[in-house]
Amino acid sequence: MQKITPFLWFDDNAGEAIDFYTSVFKNSKVINVRKYNNVAAGSKSDVMTGTIELEGQQFMLLNGGPMFKFTPAISLFINCETQEEVDYYWDKLSEGGRTDRCGWLQDKFGLSWQVVPSVLGSLLGNKDAAKAKRAMTAMLQMTKLDIAALQQAADQE
């Protein structure tokens, strides 16, 4: 069993979120779903809790009511190896949500994600401070991160 599991509080759409997240991530599964007894059977809002696994990481989801909302103070970071992967997660997760700067977005449930190419760390941490600064300047101007544009900015003289 995983020692620490993120616990996500939804108003009444945890069932929809379970379906959505497990459709976006190819390496995913529903581990369990527990239902409320006093809600119409078959309704997505009849989900009390659910546990899913996305890319090896377990998450618990709860239909807990409207008391709490997601905030960008907590985000889920997706490490992407290719631009194709960045594009895929960006397009899927931002649909119905909103995009922010520097690879951040909020999905249709309000949960914040960072869709980030793995090469960004080495570009921003380049021993050549001028290259690192150019990569940072380029990133700060982007919404969805573009690997080729970041590398090109870093390599400009």
Image (tube, rainbow, N blue to C red):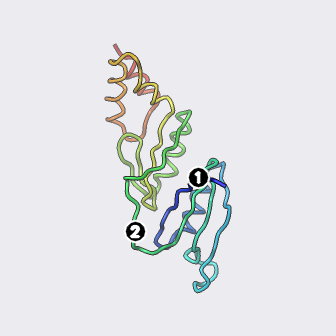
Q: Residue sitting at 65 percent across and 69 percent down?
A: 33
Say what secondary structure mark 2 lies in.
loop
Residue 41 figure quarter: bottom right
Instruction: Give the labeled residue for mark 1.
Output: 24
Q: Residue sitting at 44 percent across and 50 percent down?
A: 75
Badge 2 vs badge 1, beta-carbon distance below 8 Å: no
Say what secondary structure mark 1 lies in.
helix
Label ID, residue 58: none
Q: Amino acid at mark 2?
A: Phe
Q: Determine the CA span between mark 2 and mark 1.
A: 24 Å
* Residue 48 pos. (x, y %): 57, 74
Q: Residues within 10 Å of mark 2 (few under 14, many from 20)?
A: few
In the rendered view, tell whether residue 27 sits above or below residue 62: above
Q: Earlier in the sequence, mark 2 or mark 1?
A: 1
Residue 142 figure quarter: top left
* Residue 153 pos. (x, y %): 37, 23
In the rendered view, tell whether residue 48 sits above or below residue 151: below
Name the quarter where the C terminus is drawn.
top left
Instruction: Give the labeled residue for mark 2.
Output: 68
Q: Residue sitting at 41 percent across and 20 percent down?
A: 126
Identify the residue at the far front of this view: 3
